[in-house]
Image: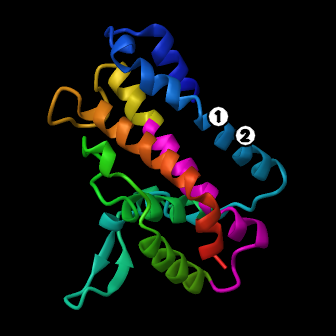
């Protein structure tokens, strides 16, 4: 959040006006950050987690069964909310995270239910009640955080994420901002699916 604000204020490559609306929409992420800070202040436990637990970091066998998680260089203390959130972020959106077809973005609740069922079954009794009831927030936090990272990189001249077209990072940011909003709009239904 601070990196984004500094990049916006500096506007080193003169792109702030091109993404004014996206920067304005990114301010909605502040409420999710406040909720996250409240959770951590109230003792949300740290656990060893993957921290990049998305679909393309899961190895599947010939029968399409998940065999193991790969790309373990990101494993460190963190929250299961982030691992769950990244799985949700990469699975419930019907378009790729860099798609410019923003109007197609929505939350596929059937896939959310499947991810939630599998994740909760795999965790067993490990998750605390607070972690369990905060999983949707985890999905929103990860999605909003990635939107800010893409938007920040766009404002800084595409220095971190590899791009394939001039507004690639801006498209990614728009995409993730739309998914962040869709997750917020569907929060009640998604919470129900976690039962």
Q: Position of residue 186 (x, y in %)?
A: 56, 58
Residue closest to the far left: 164
Tell me where the magenta segment starts and ends, as one range: 124-147
Residue closest to the far bottom: 63
**Residue 182 colored magenta?**
no
Q: Quadrant of residue 90?
A: bottom left
Instruction: Report the quarter where the C terminus lies.
Output: bottom right
Is 45 situated left or right of 123 in this image? right
Question: Is residue 77 something one can see in this rendering?
Answer: no
The residue located at (59%, 75%) in the rendering is 193
Is 103 situated left or right of 32 in this image? left
Is 13 situated left or right of 20 in this image? left
Q: Position of residue 12 (x, y in %)?
A: 37, 8
Q: Are marks 1 and 2 in contact (CB under 8 Å)?
A: yes
Is 64 situated left or right of 129 in this image? left
The disc label shown at residue 34, or none? 2
Cα separation, mark 1 vs mark 2, equals 6 Å
Question: Is residue 191 something one can see in this rendering?
Answer: yes
- In this rendering, is residue 39 above or below 144? below
Q: Residue at label 1?
A: 30
- In this rendering, is residue 120 above or below 72? below
């Amino acid at each position: 959040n601070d990196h984004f604000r500094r990049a916006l204020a500096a506007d080193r490559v003169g792109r702030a006006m091109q993404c004014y609306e996206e920067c304005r929409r990114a301010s909605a992420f502040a409420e999710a950050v406040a909720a996250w800070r409240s959770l951590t202040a109230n003792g949300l436990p740290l656990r060893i987690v993957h921290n990049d637990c998305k679909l393309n970091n899961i190895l599947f066998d010939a029968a399409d069964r998940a065999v193991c998680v790969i790309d373990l260089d990101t494993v460190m203390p963190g929250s299961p909310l982030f691992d769950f959130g990244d799985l949700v972020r990469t699975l419930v959106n019907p378009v790729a995270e860099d798609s410019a077809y923003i109007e197609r973005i929505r939350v596929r609740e059937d896939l959310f239910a499947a991810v939630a069922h599998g994740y909760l079954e795999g965790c067993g009794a490990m998750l605390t009640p607070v972690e369990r009831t905060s999983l949707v927030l985890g999905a929103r936090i990860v999605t909003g955080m990635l939107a800010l990272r893409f938007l920040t990189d766009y404002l800084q001249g595409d220095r971190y994420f590899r791009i394939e077209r001039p507004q690639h990072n801006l498209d990614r940011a728009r995409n993730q901002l739309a998914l962040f909003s869709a997750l917020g709009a569907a929060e009640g239904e998604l919470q129900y699916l976690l039962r």
